[in-house]
Amino acid sequence: MKKIAKWESPSNIALIKYWGKHGGQLPNNPSISFTLTNSKTITSVELVSKTDKNIEFLFNNDISESFSTRIENFLNSISSELPFINDYSFIIKSKNTFPHSAGIASSASAFSALALCLIDLKQQLGFKITDFFSEASYFARLGSGSACRSVYGGVALWGETDLIENSSNKFAVSLNDIIHPIFKNYHDDIIIVNSEKKHISSSLGHKLMDTNPYRNIKYKQSKINLNELLLSLKSGNLTDFIRITESEALSLHSMMMLSNPSFILLQPKTLQIISEIIRFRNHTKIPISFTLDAGPNVHVLYPHKFTDEVKEFLSDNFNHNCQIINDFTS
Ligand code: DP6
């Protein structure tokens, strides 16, 4: 019988950032993210009889050699743990619901969707699965660290902390059971400042943390931030949520500026948008805030009930010169 698996998985935005890793893609500090809803990758993986060509990878129906090599390396790297990989050739078809050039991290959704397909195929082939999503998260992590948080909807934590039972550096866990309802459907409108490919990859950014003289202080602070963020996610205290998440975003970019060599991904427009968001919040008392990925685009976060007010604010100020992607965590 034909063995094929098809999964879709969204991108995610970190609130406590993963920045720096060691060993086999293990994080230097635990991180927490909102999984998005609309910005996702849809992937199918078909197992076919083994030929010389191990993998055929089609992105938007076109052959993509560069991503194909990354996936082939990934499959080789996990084949000792998933030995069925050696018995077949793979036809993988993938597409994103968001524009490739939108500046949204696509490796998180891509590796999450791929890992979900692999665990699905493992199950179809009759191998024992102990916990489907933890196993998918484990393999997604080996493709791209942040991908392990995307297999769950809502809020996810990756990395060991005494505060969450079963937390692990090897896979993410869902926090949905402990999250205050205000964070249900929490919005993330992404203002695209620049859609070009980053000139510094995340991998190099992580590596530069190894020699960053401020790393220990940064990890100590992120641990405190994580503890406090968990409390605010449970209680629904948005003042703390905003203070902690904005500080995390700025400290991520501070680390880039303090690396050796240093680099800057923020652009003048990023800072201008951040200032406007803070001004709007102070003026209206609407609990809108920002966070940043490893790039210049601004993620605008706010509770669902303020959708109309924020929509008007964004369209008055940014719609005419920036693309905005509307998303939310489920
Ligand atoms: C700033 O997961 O893209 O988005 O593990 O090398 O693939 P690799 O890195 P990646 O790094 C994400 C960094 C970040 C913060 C985060 O998502 O936690």
Image: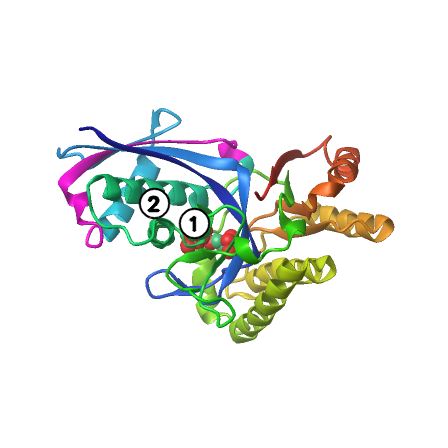
Under 8 Å from ligand 1: the CB of mark 1? yes
Q: Which residues are magenta?
A: 79-101
What is the C-alpha distance between the residues marked 1 and 2? 9 Å
The amino acid type found where label 1 is placed reads: Ala
Q: Is residue 9 visible?
A: yes
In the rendered image, which quarter is residue 38 located in? top right
Pick out the residue farthest to the top: 61
Inspect the magenta stretch and tell me whether residue 116 lies in it. no
Q: Is residue 304 left or right of residue 255?
A: right
User: According to the image, label 2 marks what residue?
Assistant: 115
Q: What quarter of the picture does the C terminus occupy? A: top right
Residue at figure coordinates x 57%, y 58% from the top left: 178
The amino acid type found where label 2 is placed reads: Ala
- Sequence order check, earlier mark of 1 and 2: 2
The tag on residue 147 is 1
Q: Is 226 or 144 nearer to us in this picture?
A: 226
Under 8 Å from ligand 1: the CB of mark 2? no
Q: Position of residue 232 (x, y in %)?
A: 66, 62
| 112 w.r.t. 142: above or below | above
How many marks can you see? 2
Residue at figure coordinates x 56%, y 75% from the top left: 217
